[in-house]
């Protein structure tokens, strides 16, 4: 409960600073709207914002699910097979040299303006951190555990399932924490490049129509969404730390 | 359990261009405790890991054989200095680990009986993090007994424990592992003098068998002859015999 009280206080402080900046600089409301204006816009446009939030949230959650699944599968495959490591790892590293954002127009071209180009963006952006963190964990199983497994006559499959994967869960947890931060970035970039729905799209739309208060409202909802997502994943990852 | 065979290791081991040991011959007597005493880095753990069939980082040439001529593999249980309990599993699940790793159905009644024998029946459902160092090593001993193997390899399993817990663990292990062939690798002369039916001292000069005190193990830690033997072992370790 104390944590929530602190978050509440931090939010109040942020809003106070914001209001002071508005008063002190005297910026016009089409550059920096006051907290009250934004709150009003948020309330007036609550239905629209909710609809677009739902779209972005779906993109992010589907993206995390697919990205985490692919990342985990790749990490296990790499950990099992030295030849896969030799071939795939350079590709993975090289792929990271390409800025994922630069792929957004191509993904939109291939997958269209709908949900899937944003999901693909989120998947691409989280795939590498999840793969890399989980793979590192799988390769760092304490030698004593592996010795014990070997003496006990464990097959490599059961060593993987019962020892290496459980021992690597804290590392997977760090990868998923990063994924929770990156996935909304991927989805919003995707929406900026080409979309007809989503909070990123709503921000561009509001900007184009000089509805700066609505733009800020969408941004705040996006930030709250990202913080909640991060908190949930963080709790989950902490549970994984405790179990391992 | 089948009757416990002896094990003989003879040969040499090199790490890169450096010779770890050469012309070494270790006889682990059937059904007895054999102590391999030596300072850190002298290669005693390598000897144990070679018998266990584990990676050592050394190139070994020579022979390792059981006295009954049957392969050693799958007849070994192993305890290390670290308890090697899985932090995510309960004490009970750690004790039944071997069966689950082999895809067999674990015999939980037997596991509980063994946990009871090491005096931890109230702790069976706890995770290792909720146990003390001594309790964790007891669970590791129960896991070793659960495997029910004739050959037991102990790599300094008591060295991280405090003096009292160590003495208790030595007594418990001597009682519960009686009749099996045990190789105990240790750097502690007191432990070797207490536990060994046979005691080998390993130094950079090679392996020598030391005299054991006349009383059968496990010996009292304040038995005068055991204390004298401990002193002689200490001298040997220091090269002042």
Image: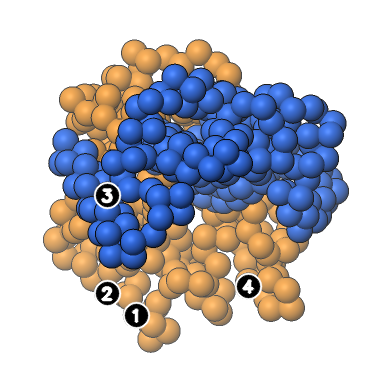
Secondary structure under tag 2 reads helix
Colour in which chain B is shown?
Answer: orange
Secondary structure under tag 4 reads strand
Do the numbered discs 1 and 2 sit on residues whose CB atoms are within 8 Å?
A: yes
The numbered mark at residue B231 is: 2
Identify the image quadrant of the N terminus of chain A.
Answer: top left
Q: Residues within 10 Å of mark 3 (few under 14, many from 20)?
A: some
Marked residue chain, label 3:
A
Do discs 2 and 4 belong to a common subunit?
A: yes
Q: Mark 1 and mark 2: span between their CA atoms?
A: 6 Å
Query: Which x, y percent locates residue A135?
Result: 63, 45
**Image position of A107 (left or right of B116):** right
Marked residue chain, label 2:
B
Colour in which chain A is shown?
Answer: blue
Do discs 3 and 4 belong to a common subunit?
A: no
**Foreground residue among B13 and A57:** A57
Query: Which x, y percent locates residue A38?
Result: 36, 40
Please name the residue that numbered disc 3 is placed on: A15
Marked residue chain, label 4:
B
Please name the residue that numbered disc 1 is placed on: B235
């Amino acid at each position: 409960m104390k944590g929530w009280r602190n978050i509440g206080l931090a939010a109040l402080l942020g809003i106070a600073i914001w209001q002071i900046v508005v008063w002190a600089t005297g910026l016009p409301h089409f550059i920096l709207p006051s907290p009250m204006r934004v709150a009003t816009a948020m309330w007036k446009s609550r239905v629209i914002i909710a609809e677009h939030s739902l779209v972005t949230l779906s993109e992010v959650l589907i993206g995390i699910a697919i990205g985490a699944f692919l990342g985990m599968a790749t990490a296990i495959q790499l950990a099992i097979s030295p030849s896969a490591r030799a071939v795939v790892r350079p590709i993975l590293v090289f792929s990271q040299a390409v800025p994922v954002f630069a792929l957004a127009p191509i993904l939109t071209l291939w997958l269209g303006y709908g949900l899937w180009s944003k999901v693909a963006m989120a998947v691409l952006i989280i795939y590498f951190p999840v793969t890399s963190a989980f793979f590192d964990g799988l390769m760092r199983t304490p030698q004593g555990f592996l010795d014990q497994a070997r003496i006990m006559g464990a097959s490599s499959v059961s060593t993987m399932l019962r020892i290496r994967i459980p021992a690597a869960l804290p590392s997977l947890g760090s990868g998923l924490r990063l994924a929770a931060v990156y996935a909304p970035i991927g989805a919003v970039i995707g929406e900026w490049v080409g979309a007809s729905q989503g909070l990123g799209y709503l921000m561009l739309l509001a900007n184009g129509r000089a509805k700066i208060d609505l733009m800020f409202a969408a941004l705040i909802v996006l930030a709250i969404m990202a913080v909640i997502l991060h908190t949930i994943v963080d709790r989950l990852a902490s549970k994984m730390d405790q179990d391992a | 359990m089948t009757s416990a065979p002896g094990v003989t290791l003879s040969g040499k081991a090199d790490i890169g261009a450096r010779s770890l040991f050469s012309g070494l011959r270790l006889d682990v007597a059937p059904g007895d405790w054999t102590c391999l005493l030596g300072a850190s880095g002298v290669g005693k753990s390598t000897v144990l890991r070679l018998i266990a069939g584990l990676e050592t980082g050394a190139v070994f040439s020579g022979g390792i054989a059981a006295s009954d001529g049957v392969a050693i593999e799958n007849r070994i249980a192993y305890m290390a200095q670290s308890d090697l309990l899985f932090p995510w599993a309960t004490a009970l699940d750690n004790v039944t680990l071997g069966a689950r790793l082999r895809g067999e159905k674990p015999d939980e009644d037997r596991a509980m009986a063994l946990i009871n024998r090491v005096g931890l029946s109230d702790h069976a459902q706890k995770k290792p993090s909720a146990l003390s160092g001594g309790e964790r090593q007891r669970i590791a001993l129960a896991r070793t007994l659960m495997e029910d193997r004739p050959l037991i390899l102990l790599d300094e399993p008591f060295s991280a424990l405090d003096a009292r817990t160590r003495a208790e663990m030595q007594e418990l292990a001597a009682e519960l592992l009686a009749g099996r062939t045990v190789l105990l690798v240790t750097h502690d002369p007191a432990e070797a003098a207490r536990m060994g039916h046979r005691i080998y001292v390993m130094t950079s000069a090679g392996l020598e068998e030391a005299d054991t005190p006349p009383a059968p193990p496990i010996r009292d830690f304040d038995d005068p002859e055991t204390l004298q033997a401990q002193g002689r072992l200490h001298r040997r370790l220091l090269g002042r015999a």
